[in-house]
Image (spheres, helix red, strand yellow):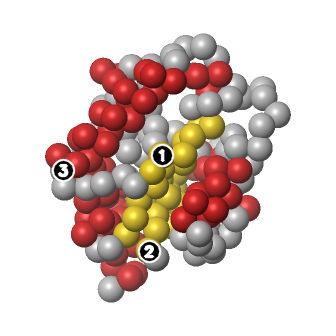
């Protein structure tokens, strides 16, 4: 099975330091939904792994998060794409959970649900914690410069050998070119 794991905020949609707290605030980065559609057309399943600490902080509730994800699914479908599943950590940053990236819990749950080893699976994110979680399970981390990507690059803690792309569309082009 061909699989790609995406972070949500800063990769698929514009990020906000004030959190994405409503469907109205969820706005796709140009080209991101079409990139997901290209992955699907090439036979890839696409799943999302996202920290959503706004739930744990009380900034929005589960029904609002579900509405945000419903909008994401609907707009992806309108672009000809499909997101097979969304895995998220609802806990606040100070919690001791195993699912908040950079911990590997979300990725382990994905592996269990899809009944597949994640070694070599492309995992596209915009933050160091995305890359670290992917590395922990042997996935192939990829950084995009959208969202927090430029800050991540400038932070000086990037692991060696991680490819960097302008945005999700560029990362998908690279994945598809390598698979060809």
Q: Which mark is residue 180?
A: none
The residue sitting at the top extreme is: 58
Q: Which residue is mark 1?
A: 86
In the rendered image of this protein, does residue 124 appear above or below residue 92?
Answer: below
Q: Residues within 10 Å of mark 3 (few under 14, many from 20)?
A: some
State the image coordinates of residue 129 (x, y, percent, origin top left): 66, 46
Residue beneath the point at 37% across and 27% down: 67
Query: Is 106 in front, or is 147?
Result: 106
Q: Is 73 positioned to the left or the right of 91 in the image?
A: left
Q: Which mark is residue 79?
A: 3
The span from disc 3 to disc 1 (Cα, nearest Å) is: 18 Å
Q: Secondary structure at mark 1?
A: strand
Upstream in sequence: badge 3 or badge 1: 3
Upstream in sequence: badge 1 or badge 2: 2
Inspect this view and state whether residue 142 appears. no
Q: Residues within 10 Å of mark 2 (few under 14, many from 20)?
A: few
In the rendered image of this protein, does residue 19 appear above or below residue 135?
Answer: above
The span from disc 2 to disc 3 (Cα, nearest Å) is: 20 Å
Q: Which residue is mark 2?
A: 2
State the image coordinates of residue 124 (x, y, percent, origin top left): 49, 57
């Amino acid at each position: 099975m061909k699989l790609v794991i995406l972070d949500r905020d800063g990769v698929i949609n514009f990020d906000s330091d004030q959190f994405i707290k409503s469907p109205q605030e969820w706005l796709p980065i140009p080209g991101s939904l079409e990139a997901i559609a290209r992955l699907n057309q090439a036979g890839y399943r696409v799943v999302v792994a996202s920290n959503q600490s706004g739930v744990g902080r009380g900034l929005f509730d589960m029904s609002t998060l579900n509405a945000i994800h419903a909008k994401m699914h609907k707009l992806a479908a309108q672009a000809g794409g499909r997101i097979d599943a969304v895995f998220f950590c609802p806990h606040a940053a100070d919690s001791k959970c195993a699912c908040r990236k950079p911990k590997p819990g979300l990725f382990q749950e994905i592996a269990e649900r899809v009944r597949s080893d994640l070694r070599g699976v492309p995992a596209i994110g915009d933050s160091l914690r995305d890359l670290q979680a992917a590395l922990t399970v042997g996935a192939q981390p990829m950084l995009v410069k959208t969202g927090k990507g430029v800050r991540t690059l400038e932070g000086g803690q990037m692991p060696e050998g991680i490819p960097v792309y302008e945005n999700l569309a560029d990362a998908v082009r690279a994945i598809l070119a390598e698979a060809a």
